[in-house]
Amino acid sequence: MYLHKEVETLNSDGLKKLQAVRLRETIAHAIRSPFYKSRRLSPDMIKTVDDIRKIPLTTKQDLRDNFPYGFLTVPKEEVVRLHSSSGTTGNPTVVFHNRHDLDSWAQLVARSLFSTGVRPSDVFQNICGYGLFTGGLGFQYGAEHLGCLTIPAGAGNSLRQIKLMRDYGTTVVHAIPSYLGRLRDVFAEEKLDPRTDTSLRIFVIGAEPHTEEQRRRIEEMYGVKAFNSYGLTEMNGPGVAFECAGQTGMHLWEDAYLAEIINPDTLEPVPDGELGELVLTTLDRQAMPLIRYRTRDLTRFIPGACPCGRTHRRIDRITGRSDDMFIIKGCNVFPMQIEGILLRIPEVGSDYRITLEELDDNDEMLVEVEVKPDWFTGDITRLDRLTREITRQIRDEVLVKPIVKLVETGSIPKSEGKAVRVFDKRPSSKGI
Ligand code: ADP
Ligand code: ZN
């Protein structure tokens, strides 16, 4: 049932004590780095975990300002690997690991996979970039640690992915969700059905925001159970929080991370169960510990115990990053609100794109939506009706009337890695 039973089921008092001990150790390591040294921290500041609030927050800007070595606590001889973030929102940030850190990370990923039902007998195909992106090596070593036959498939080349799945009887796949719609289209072009022509049973999807509707679609398309996986380079990568078999939120591994959820404006903790910005502290990292790191990801703690017996608190699906939000006609909009609507509509295909532009002195939101091939036929009234329906639903949700344009499956250009959903072409924007 559990890979690390003792720690996964430790009661909340026990967890808090463990966190306090590890937080003191973390501070002791951290103050060897130039950055934390300058902050004058000391392990003695911590009697209980709540004392963490005495310490100032660390931001992405701090990482950039102290690039590359300002957060390093050990001599470079001891460092064995670096990863850097994909730079979705600006310059990359870099994180260094020693052997201890890599081992601890592999164990967290192994534990996470196990909690979804992955076992050593599984064949794990890792469909994502193997470079600086943490999803590649992060899942590779985690799945190996668990004992799976692990296929380092890398990203793209869908025909080869399908061949690997069929040749080696892949049962588990890790991929970013926006890729899986495309892969399904290639299955169809090959006249194959993943539900009957493969042995797939578990998907692990993460690295980018996606909705419950997207998950259900993936499960339906492939005949699998799909589990949400959350992580970020600054906190190693995958293995920070993961859904268990119950699929009711992601257990955040509290022996390895101390989690707070704060109001991003006041920086005060939000009441339990309310939405706010996730702030994380590493509790088991030596080469580059981070204390009270502002993830900019918005989520909430899910109240109550999980039936699986794991005691580590669960966080909800990430609504988006605080910097994903855009403002149009005075309304705050998250791309995931629009995705949620689109993917509930059966005629809608797997991709969409939002463009903000200025037309005749007005800001407009253009939403291009791919429609499934059997719908995208000559019947104009049918397409008109669908356009009106999508327009109405989006307006009701975000309070701005969009210009909806239905397009053919496959016609929206794909980005290389993580999906880019919003293009802001307004003169006032910095031109994303
Ligand atoms: P970058 O910041 O350049 O995208 P990372 O690869 O480190 O680099 O991405 C981490 C970010 O990806 C997280 O902070 C979060 O915004 C997003 N992310 C990761 N996993 C998920 C998930 N399961 N759901 C939603 N967003 C996710
Ligand atoms: Zn659970």
Image: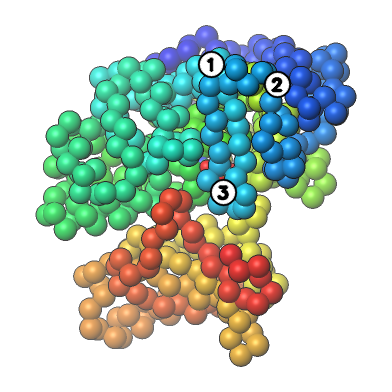
Hey, which quadrant is residue 42 in on the image? top right
What coloring was used for the rendering? rainbow
Farthest residue toward the top? 6
Q: Residues within 10 Å of mark 2 (few under 14, many from 20)?
A: many
Quarter holding the C terminus is bottom right
**Image check: 370 left or right of 264?**
left
Picture disc at residue 87: 3
Q: Is residue 120 above or below residue 412?
A: above
Q: Which residue is under mark 1?
A: 99
Q: Gap between marks 2 and 3, in whole Å?
A: 24 Å
Question: Callout 1, which amino acid?
Answer: Arg
Percent across and percent down for residue 3 are 43, 15
Which structural element holds mark 3? Answer: loop
Q: Which is nearer the eye, 361 or 374?
A: 361
Where residue 291 sits: x, y (%)? 73, 29
Residue type at mark 3 is Gly
Mark pair 1, 2: CA separation: 14 Å
Residue 300 screen position, x and y as percent = 63, 41
Point out the tag, 1 or 2, that comes first from the N-terminus. 2
Q: Are marks 2 and 3 in contact (CB under 8 Å)?
A: no
Left or right of 172: which side holds 48? right
Tell whether label 2 touches label 1 (CB within 8 Å). Answer: no
Of callouts 1 and 3, which one flags the residue occurring earlier in the amino acid sequence? 3
Q: Position of residue 186 (x, y in %)?
A: 22, 55
- Give the residue type at disc 2: Thr
Q: Quadrant of the N terminus?
A: top left
- For label 3, being within 8 Å of ligand 1 is answered yes
Query: For numbered disc 2, what is the local secondary structure?
Result: loop
Q: Residue at x 62, y 52 (%)?
A: 90
